[in-house]
Image (spheres, helix red, strand yellow):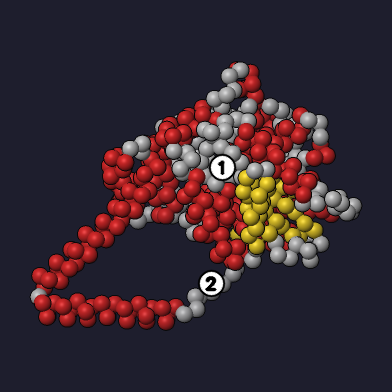
Amino acid sequence: MATSTTYGSIATDAKATPRSGGCASAFKSLLHLLLFTAIVAFVALKFGLAVVLFLFLGLLVLGYAAVFAGFCYMARPYVLSVFEVPVAALRLQFALLSAVAAYALRGFKPLFPEWTLSYEICVRFLRFTFENYGEIIAVEHAAILREPYRELGKKRLPANCLEHNTIPEVLHANGMEHQWIRDPEREKKAHRLVVVIYHGGGYAVADPLQHVELANQTHTLLQQILQSEHQLDVSVDVLLANYRKAPECPYPTPLNDCFGMYQYVLKHENILPSHVLLCGDSAGGEMAITSCMRLREANTPELQPLAAVCYSPLVDFKDRGNDEKQPFDLLSVKFTNRVLDSYLRTVTDPKERLLVSPIENSLQNLPPMFLQWGTLECFFDQGVRFKAKAEAEGVTNMEFVFMPNMAHDPSMFPPWLCPGAEIAIRHGCTFAAKQAARVLRATTEPEPEN
């Protein structure tokens, strides 16, 4: 049985499967506790309670020293001088403790029904860093902050691909390193799709590998939905495309790089444009939309992709949000102002600067598009106006979803941290599967030969 929710249908008749080894795990934990208690009792009897307390305090000091060192490492990209690091580390700890304390004072209830403690901590922590260090993050240390995303993605890549039965494959193209998430059975499937993902990060920070989870979830969910709802056996390859970033490379370089990777896929993957899906979040979502607009302006409708799936896309560069109006979003105006001004610093002509925003252009004659925003995020009002513009122009091939009580871009988080992440991605994949089924059933000609 399925129940209707804000986000669609969710199966409710599946029985919970108990974890294997649960009793054994509990017994092992009990043994560890008993062993620890026995050691403490022995030390107390042998050397006295004062020694036990001294050792306990010593362990606490060492533990906090290790934690503080970790926060110092985390704080380094947020400040300009090493002498500011300890203060920044203390402020970050205070922000974290404040989030936990607020949760406890509410009776251990989440801020919103759709939130969890881990998601609330993450949102509040990011908001704190963007509010207090947004200008440094956006420009001075943007390059430094790309590496942690990359390293974290590299660590998660093998296990995540194993979980989803995909094959990671590094691609060197157009002077940059990109990441394929390949379907190991693509030669056996009746049809094939390629998804090109442009990551967000304000055109300045982050890395393609931050979206290892998004890529694998897209691969798995798109295949499952096509099979279960449309009875189509489809191979799905996902390309995490890289692009040069501001402040080193301002507009239009990131956009040109993204467009270039779409052209690369068409040229080297032996696939029709109508079998390629563009996808992006935040800044990446804007570049997916603008790439389609570029193809329209070039009068090349035959090169338009199957569709575009955009999570929390920026569609109006003039609207930077409002911290008072969106107090629960993870982004702050200080960061968006600085990062977007840096990205557009070479666009000095007022008319050209206006037309950079997708919302200032016609929304007609574009491929099908899925656009999703959270109701708590700084780009929510943009989404509402974008929807109104599409309706005013008579556009019927765009689907808009506004996720209640969600901050900016839930799709970028792993599902264990943000329950809304899988819901957001499933929405996008459901839309993409519907478009793919329509095209795949209608397409009878073979793929183009190299």
Residue found at x 25% / y 77%: 36
In the depicted structure, whether residue 343 falls above or below residue 237: above
Query: In the rendered picture of this protein, how many numbered marks are placed on residues?
Result: 2
Q: Disc 1 vs disc 2: which is toward the camera?
A: 1
In the picture provided, is 231 more to the left or to the right than 207? right
- Residue found at x 53% / y 72%: 16
Of residue 53 and residue 362, the one placed in the foreground of this image is 53
Could you tell whether 216 is left or right of 276 in the image? Answer: left
Where is residue 234? Give x, y as percent.
76, 60
Is residue 85 shown left or right of residue 365?
left
x then y, percent, for residue 258:
66, 40
Q: Earlier in the sequence, mark 1 or mark 2?
A: 2
Q: Quadrant of residue 373?
A: top right
**Circle 2 SS class:** loop
Q: Is residue 263 above or below residue 293?
A: below
Which residue in the structure is indicated by mark 1?
A: 200
| Whether residue 347 is visible | yes
Q: Nearer the viewer, residue 448 or 284?
A: 448
* Dot 2 alpha-carbon crowd within 10 angstroms: few under 14, some 14 to 19, many 20 or more: few
Q: Secondary structure at mark 1?
A: loop
Residue at 17% in and 68% down = 55
Separation of marks 1 and 2 at Cα, in angstroms: 36 Å
Residue 5 visible in the current orientation: no
**Amino acid bearing label 1:** Gly
In the orientation shown, which residue stands out farthest toward the front?
175
- Rendered location of residue 192, percent (x, y): 77, 57
Quadrant position of residue 198: top right
Q: Amino acid at mark 2?
A: Ala
Residue where numbered disc 2 is placed: 16
